[in-house]
Image (tube, helix red, strand yellow):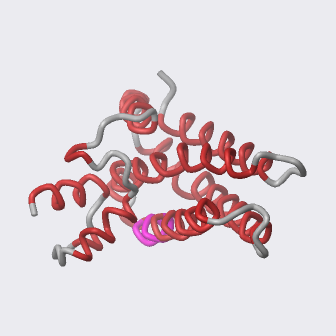
Amino acid sequence: MPDIVEIIKEQHRQVDELLTRAAEEDADTAALLQQVAGMLLPHSAAEEDFVYPAIRDAAIEAGEEVADGATEHHQIEEMLRNLLDGDPDDPGYDGTLAAITGELRHHVQEEEEELLPILEQRLSDQEREEMGRRFAEATAGGSPEQGHEHLSRHDLYEKAKEQQIPGRSKMSRDQLAEALGES
């Protein structure tokens, strides 16, 4: 089983390829963006659920960069939702697609240069492989608890906000799903 760093980097490349294809003339942009969402939303959720906390635990000094990464996830997810709700012929659609591609490439570069090396340097091969197995399961349509498997962390956060669940801003995707299941 490849380790977590290899899996994350490979998924980054796959999403970038889909976005590149979506921007091409005569592309089925809507279908390609659905594929991006199908990969990116579980990817971001898994990173926030256990990859980012592992990085923060391994290097407390990376806490701010981890928080920034999560914020970037939510911004990218919001832009992606806007594209999915729109029509490729809408004014500004191409600009939003270019913006999400640029934002995602910036995020990937920071993650691969600043955060993932922490895992390579501070976790054992076995720990990285175990995390890779868990990540592969989570991003291949694993079954998060409480019947919220189709919702991103952002969606769960919004539901938690509606229900006024305390501490929601610091909760991972799994914690939000659990809190919503118990309320």
Q: Position of residue 18 (x, y in %)?
A: 72, 44
Is residue 138 in the magenta section?
A: no
Which residue: 77% across, 46% down? 28
Q: Quadrant of residue 157?
A: bottom left
Which residue: 36% across, 30% down? 130
Is residue 65 in the magenta section?
A: yes
Which residue: 81% across, 54% down? 23
Q: Position of residue 42 (x, y in %)?
A: 45, 46
Please give left or right for residue 95 compared with residue 116 in the image: right
Work out which quarter of the rendered image holds the C terminus and state it.
bottom left
Please give left or right for residue 2 compared with residue 138 in the image: right
Q: Residue furthest top?
A: 1
37 versus 161 height, above or below: above
Please give left or right for residue 179 compared with residue 176 in the image: left
Q: Which residues are magenta?
A: 63-69
Is residue 171 or residue 145 the one in the foreground? 145
49 versus 168 height, above or below: above
Which residue: 64% across, 64% down? 83
Q: Position of residue 103 (x, y in %)?
A: 67, 66
Q: Quadrant of residue 170?
A: bottom left
Type of secondary structure dominating the magenta stretch: helix
Q: Position of residue 85 (x, y in %)?
A: 59, 64
